Amino acid sequence: MKYGFLPQSIPAYSSFEVVNALRAKHPDYTYKPAMLNPTNPRDRAQDWEEDVISQFAKNTTLTEYVGQRGTASGQAMFIARPIRLPNPACLQCHSTVDAAPPTMIEKYGPANGFGWKMNDTLGAQIVSVPMAVPLKRADDAFGVVMGSLTGVFVLIGVVLNLMLWKLVIQPVTKLSALADRVSLGERDAPRVPPAPKDEIGTLSESFARMRKSLVHAMLL
C-alpha cells in the first residue's frame, strides 16, 4: 500500500476477476459487487442494481433478495446480498480523501469511494444466471414425465383390450358360432367347453342345457 495500490488485495476485485475467467466460456453468468459510490468505476451500480440496493437500504434485516430480469439473451435470475460497512477499519481508506492512502488516490482518483459511514448499505453482491438452462431442463423433464405417462396409459389400454378379448369377446364369439350351428339343426356340433365360474361360464352352462333340451325335444 505504501509503494503501490494492489487491486487484487480487495476481495470484491478478486472475486470479480475469478468470475470473469468463468465468463470466457459462459458469458451469460455474471457476478458484480454493485456499489452506489465505488472506488473502482466499473463497480458502479446500474439502474436495476440501484433498485436492488434500495431494497436492502429500506429493510436492514433483509439478507438476500431474489428476482428476475430481462436481458439481451433472455430472462435471467439474480440473487443479491447486501454490502454493508460493519468494520471501522474500512474507513481508513473510504472516510475522506485526506485519510486515504495516496497510492489508492493515484490509481482511482479522489472523486469516488469516499464518505462511507458505519452500517450503511453501500451496495450489493449480485449473481445473475440465465433462465434458459433451468427452463430447458424443466421442459425436458416435463416431456419425459408426459411421455412416460402416455406409455403407461397405452400399455394399460393394450392389456385391458387383450383381457377383454380373451375373457369376453372370444368366448362369446365361440358361443355365437355354436348357437348358429345348433339353430341350423347340426346335432354333431361340438359341445361347449367347460368355462370358468363367471358370467361367461354361467352363459355357457345355460347354453349347454338349452342345447341338451333342444336335442332331446328333436328326438321325441
Image (spheres, helix red, strand yellow):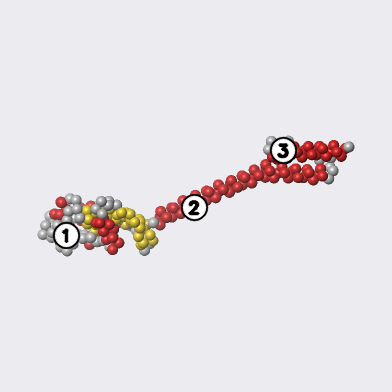
Residue drawn at x 80%, y 39% as measured from the top left: 211
Residue 190: x, y in percent? 79, 39
Amino acid residing under circle 2: Gly
The answer to whether residue 8 is visible is no
> Tag 2 or tag 3, which sits nearer the N-term?
2
Q: Residue at x 73, y 40 (%)?
A: 203
Q: On the image, numbered disc 2 is attached to which residue?
A: 143
Tag 3: amino acid: Thr
- Residue 42 badge: none
Nearest the camera: 140 or 153? Answer: 153
- Residue 11's spot in the image, x, y percent? 23, 52
The residue beneath circle 3 is 202
Quarter containing the N terminus = bottom left
User: Image quarter for residue 124?
Assistant: bottom left
Q: Return the disc, 1 or 2, that comes first in the chain's sequence.
A: 1
Q: What crowding class fits label 3: few (fewer than 14 Cα within 10 Å), some (14-19), or many (20 or more)?
A: few
Q: Is residue 76 visible?
A: yes
In-front residue for pair 6/128: 128
Sequence-wise, the earlier of marks 1 and 3 is 1
| Residue denoted by label 1 | 114
Residue 12: x percent and y percent?
24, 54
- What is the three-letter code of the residue carrying label 1? Phe
As drawn, 34 above or below 152: below
Q: How many marks?
A: 3
